[in-house]
Amino acid sequence: ETGVTQSPTHLIKTRGQQVTLRCSSQSGHNTVSWYQQALGQGPQFIFQYYREEENGRGNFPPRFSGLQFPNYSSELNVNALELDDSALYLCASSPVELNTEAFFGQGTRLTVV
Amino acid sequence: DQQVKQNSPSLSVQEGRISILNCDYTNSMFDYFLWYKKYPAEGPTFLISISSIKDKNEDGRFTVFLNKSAKHLSLHIVPSQPGDSAVYFCAAMNNAGNMLTFGGGTRLMVKP
């Protein structure tokens, strides 16, 4: 059984650009959540997808968007990157829409310059 | 407004002694609490959880205590081991069950 995998592991982008981060959920998991972890802080909830539909959103602007595919993998897209978007982006998958069994990937470190 | 707070950014403990990590929350609607451990360059790993209907949950060396009236939970690790050195996050789940709110983390260092 494979765990949650995220790609790429590191990324450097220029302010104003767009970025797409990818997440493959753990086998059998149909729910994916995305979190942003700024340096020295705890992860902050961005949004969750369940069966390809958004199932809750945190306090992030619309330029943060996502997709979930039929195989339950997911993408996080960020448009018009800002310097403050520099952070570790974590993906977590769970077998149902409850996060009590969420398993996290290793994250993608995004640096915006 | 931080709804989940871990007021100690770091904690140093001798191997074999007890580690106590604390967490406070403000939202009385939270009904499930979790602790995660995070090593550098890895994602958070689930450690232990507790439902709001309980006041204690134990799993091996790890025990979580919940005091609902004080809106406070703590994680006890006994005995502490050097491999426990990591950043520990407490998290609270909303009653819709779709969002975790994390504290800022406590870095635990267990000295041999």
Image (cartoon, rainbow, N blue to C red):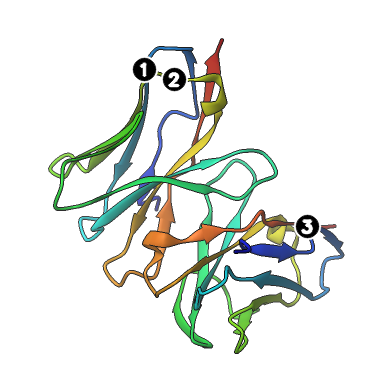
Query: How many numbered discs, if any?
Result: 3
Q: Are marks 3 and 1 on the same chain?
A: no
Q: Give whichever of A20, B65 is nearer the camera.
A: B65
Q: Are marks 1 and 2 on the same chain?
A: yes
Q: Is residue B65 left or right of residue B81?
A: left
Residue flagged by tag 1: what amino acid is it? Answer: Ile
Relative to A41, is B106 above or below? Answer: above
Q: Secondary structure at mark 2?
A: loop
Residue flagged by tag 2: what amino acid is it? Answer: Ser
Write down the residue under mark 1: B18
Q: Are marks 2 and 3 on the same chain?
A: no
Write down the residue under mark 2: B80
Q: Secondary structure at mark 1?
A: loop
Q: Quadrant of the N terminus of chain A?
A: bottom right
Residue flagged by tag 3: what amino acid is it? Answer: Thr
Relative to A74, is A4 above or below? Answer: above
State which quadrant residue B23 falls in. Answer: top left
Mark with earlier residue (1, 2):
1
Instruction: Please tell me how crowded label 2 is: few (under 14), some (14-19), or many (20+) other residues with Cα within 10 Å.
Output: many
Residue positioned 67% across, 70% down in the render:
A23
Write down the residue under mark 3: A9
Residue A59's tag is: none
Residue positioned 55% across, 20% down in the render:
B82
